[in-house]
Amino acid sequence: MSIANPPFSRVVLAAAVVLSLGYASANAQSSSASATLSFNVVASSPTALTWLAADSFSSSNASSAAFAGWSPTGFGEFAPTFNTPVTDSATTLGLWRQSSYALAADGLNFSSSFTFSPTTRQASLQTTSTIDQGGFGSGDAFVRSHFSLAPGASVTFTGGLTLSVFGTNQAFTPDYITTDLYGSATGLMSIGGFAEDSRTIGNAALPYTAGNYAFNEAQTLSVSMTNNTTSAMNGYFEAGVGVYSVSAVPEPGNYAMLLAGLACVGLVAHRRRRG
């Protein structure tokens, strides 16, 4: 029994689908870096700490830039270039007032912050950078809350810093310089210069490997101070968090794959018209 060969148009169409899917797979990419810093304050007595609205503020910033093209490096290779970043920022004065979250023009990056509440004694900072196509994004949030500490009283600020990152690395040939995805979050807590505790989580030096990956990390921060004088002392608490993420951009060879797929589709259409 013999098996009939499939029509030429079906063979070419199948090849076109494979090439186009190959391009789509190579070009598919997304990445996200998100950091949250949640913290609270514990005073030695209910009357030990008084918040001062004057000069207290919160701020947030977000920026993003899209892939612009390839630039020769002079070594027979190409490096990706990006458009001028678009940045939004917002600042709000006063206690327990949310900084109007900064949102980049692409609608994907945001950053928000809260100053401390006189009643809840809690606050949080959050920033997210999401890249759905070749490009980079960043976000940061910051607060400074002023207070007065009673004689002999002490206060402790504690916080938890978390980072979540996911992304897709493409398979590249060694002939091209590529960008990589990473997310890092730097959390900072300080009190008027008397104490400071900071943590940096995330690893920007991870080896480049093709495929999907994700990681989550967490760290704790804590700062304390005591008023050893016989009179009330003013001070301020400040905290900040930020992330940065990059998505790999498709290598020029991937576009050739797409064009080959489109050419096959055109050939099939041409043969059908002639038939």
Image (tube, helix red, strand yellow):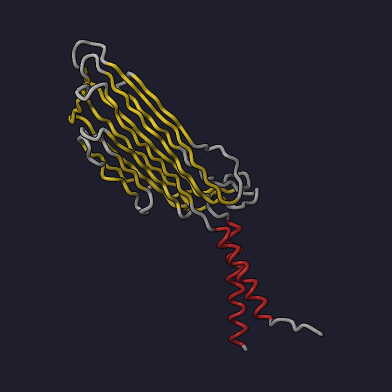
| Lateral position of residue 43 relative to residue 197, left or right | left
In the displayed structure, 144 sits above or below 174; it is above
Give the x, y percent position of residue 163: 44, 40
Between 228 and 113, the one nearer to me in the picture: 228
| Lateral position of residue 189 relative to residue 181, left or right | left
Q: Quadrant of residue 264?
A: bottom right
* Residue at the farthest bottom position: 275
* Residue at the farthest front position: 45
Give the x, y percent position of residue 176: 61, 49
Give the x, y percent position of residue 108: 38, 52
Residue drawn 39% across the image and 34% down it: 160
In the displayed structure, 131 sits above or below 5; it is above
Q: Quadrant of the C terminus?
A: bottom right
Give the x, y percent position of residue 204: 52, 38
Between 85 and 104, the one nearer to me in the picture: 104
Q: Quadrant of residue 158?
A: top left
Q: Quadrant of the N terminus?
A: bottom right
* Residue at the farthest right position: 1
Between 44 and 134, the one nearer to me in the picture: 44
In the displayed structure, 245 sits above or below 234; it is below
| Lateral position of residue 206 relative to residue 143, left or right | right
Residue drawn 35% across the image and 54% down it: 107
Residue drawn 18% across the image and 13% down it: 231
